[in-house]
Amino acid sequence: MGPAAAKPARHTNLTDVARRAGVSSMTVSRALRRPESVSEDTRRRVERAVAALGYVPNNIAGGLRSRRSRTIACVIPTIASPVFANVVQGLTDVLYGHDYRVVLGTSNYSEAEEQRVTAGLLAHRPEAVVLPAGDHRRELGRLLKRVGVPVVEIWERLENPVDMNVGFSNRDVGAAVVTHLVERGARRIAFVGMGADEHARARARREAYAETVARLLDQKPIVFDAPFTIDGGRAALARILRDDPAIDAVFCVGDLPAVGVLLEAHEAGCAVPQRLMVAGFGDHEFGRQIRPGLTTVRVPERRIGQIAAEMIVGRLGDHDTGPRAIDVGFEVIPRDSTARTQADDSG
Amino acid sequence: MGPAAAKPARHTNLTDVARRAGVSSMTVSRALRRPESVSEDTRRRVERAVAALGYVPNNIAGGLRSRRSRTIACVIPTIASPVFANVVQGLTDVLYGHDYRVVLGTSNYSEAEEQRVTAGLLAHRPEAVVLPAGDHRRELGRLLKRVGVPVVEIWERLENPVDMNVGFSNRDVGAAVVTHLVERGARRIAFVGMGADEHARARARREAYAETVARLLDQKPIVFDAPFTIDGGRAALARILRDDPAIDAVFCVGDLPAVGVLLEAHEAGCAVPQRLMVAGFGDHEFGRQIRPGLTTVRVPERRIGQIAAEMIVGRLGDHDTGPRAIDVGFEVIPRDSTARTQADDSG
DNA sequence: GCACTCGTTGTTAACGATAACAGATCATGT
DNA sequence: ACATGATCTGTTATCGTTAACAACGAGTGC
């Protein structure tokens, strides 16, 4: 152990295997990648030599020559969020089955970082890049275009994707939830948003809320902003009950504040769903466990990752025919927080 | 767009840049990797040429020659668990700062899969491998040893790590929680475990529980097994109250069943913490929000990833002097579920 | 003025695999 | 018997970079 790091040792390579198997290295390469293209006898001898020498293929060398790194880059804001973790899980699930690996980068919700990280990943010559739909830097778009690598923008369904796109429409989400509430008897619906922290997805939900209450109830939007936390939701409901008691339903931008609304309602003696209905977004575990159960919207996160992977595999394979954009939709999960019966409604 | 996938196009390479800058490609390489090793003038000319041509370095080629892929492999059971997601986040946080990328693999809690995935990742010649401590297959250990790549086993602190190791001791966790309960006045403590699903970490906690109740209370272990869910915890407490009403504290193998215990206690009219104290493990969000708050154990997940990364960077750099094993410890978070006062205790 | 070092740059030969092509062998049909 | 094609294997050059070494000029000390 000297002071300097030991130079990584030489591994056994194709030539070693070839020598041992008594064939050329090209034959070994073939035997490993397309076993049906060599004779039965050769294949067996190569297999034995590989096992005996413990040969591990070197994708770096192969990738250099063939220009196919068998690597897909994925840049997300953070992995420490179930949303993106699930997407990545779906992505790897499918890609590994096709012998692609995933190289991960995190942008920590910073566009500058996203740009830097993506550029760094490109040095590894990924065969495709996956990143969340959103307000990328212009530079990043140009970089990706110049490199000419296939790109999948995920999560949000876009009007004009850079290349490929899988996601759902947050506008549709807003409309669906409001419609659900109205069907259950809501007559005056408030929206709990995130104020200055509002991102594009949240904005889309809010705007769709506004349009839909206008259309179905002829109501003006009533928006209460609060931090995206349980306590934020509590505070929001306190204000709602004080400022506008006629409100009989609340649509929260996410499940966390929605749970806060439920807890505050319980303490304030405000009956859910009889007096007030509550709906959130994201299908957080909380909402499933709390009583009454929280009506919410479930997005097929994992499925988004899987579909992105399938698109990539199709594009890189020899059957580049699949669609370039897919709307995976979402699911409104009705639970007790909006389970108002006709009898309740009349009260 | 023909039926076959287009062969990835040739990118601008070092030679292109060199030609434009009027130097040799070796000089460009140096200017990019160690700018201080070329003259001021040369550096500027190279920078300009790089910018003009939009050159993106090719790590595949560089890695082949230098045998340094600047890639770290990380194999975890699933990314869709906050535990591992946080570890990976910590890992990438640090590694990206040192210009390493993380290639991810998931084993889905299967040893066979772990073996396969790791072998696949090794083809990309990672400079180190990170994987959870645990019962790897023998083959895997041999493979890693033969390849000679540095390995960090994470999460659990091991007696005999394969190579490097960062984690905490689940035995210490068990002892610390029981000690906490005893200090708060517990006299008869039950353990809610996971029965047949018990993994090595859970077992360590259970065994330490048994030893510590023996030592401090001269009590025999009282174990109730239940599924690792909220409902499992509910069922476990129902049995506890029926079978052994003298029990005044419950240590659950995880927060999920512990929350179930809390909920069931509430419904059964069993006062927490006065009549019964409850402790869990994992610092799940639930436990923070529920009332009474759940006493639990917090493990510095992200820190584990960061330390693993630091160990790797040290090992691969020219200062291979750091420790090869680190116990990151853990933190008992006392909340109301064990906040019994002296007065309570006497009742 | 000579040997020597230092800083800078260039030249050459890998790294380990695979694409592309060429050659060998063998069966088959005519 | 011979062309034809199918099947299998070998040879050569190459992917883009960097390690290793060589070379050169300028400055330095004696």
Image (tube, coloured by chain):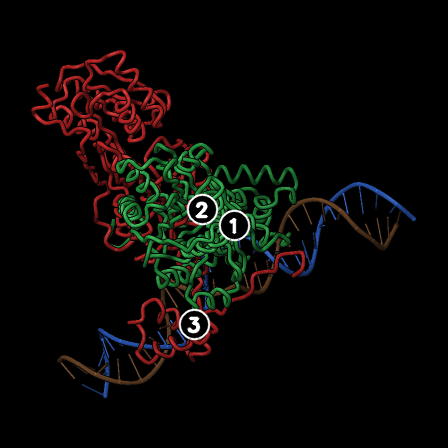
Chain colours: A green, B red, C blue, D brown
Q: Chain of mark 2?
A: A
Q: Is residue A60 left or right of residue A236?
A: right
Locate residue A182, reporting x and y percent. Answer: 47, 44
Q: Quadrant of the C terminus of chain A?
A: top left
**Mark 2, residue position:** A87
In the depicted structure, whether residue B298 falls above or below residue B21: above
Element under disc 3: helix
Mark 3: few, some, or many residues within 10 Å (few <14, many ≥20)?
some
Q: Nearer the viewer, mark 3 or mark 2?
A: 2
Q: Chain of mark 3?
A: B
Q: Nearer the viewer, mark 3 or mark 1?
A: 1
In the depicted structure, whether residue A322 falls above or below residue A115: above
Q: Is residue D3 left or right of residue A87?
A: right
Task: Name which residue lies at 25% across and 26% down.
Answer: B205
User: Looking at the rendered structure, which numbered label has been put on residue B25?
Assistant: 3
Q: Disc 1 residue type?
A: Ala
**Mark 1, residue position:** A308
Q: Disc 3 residue type?
A: Ser
Asked if residue B156 shows in the view, the reply is: no
Check if mark 1's residue and mark 2's residue have beta carbons within 8 Å. Answer: yes
In the depicted structure, whether residue B138 falls above or below residue B194: below
Element under disc 2: helix
Q: Chain of mark 1?
A: A
Locate residue B287, reporting x and y percent. Answer: 26, 34
Element under disc 1: helix
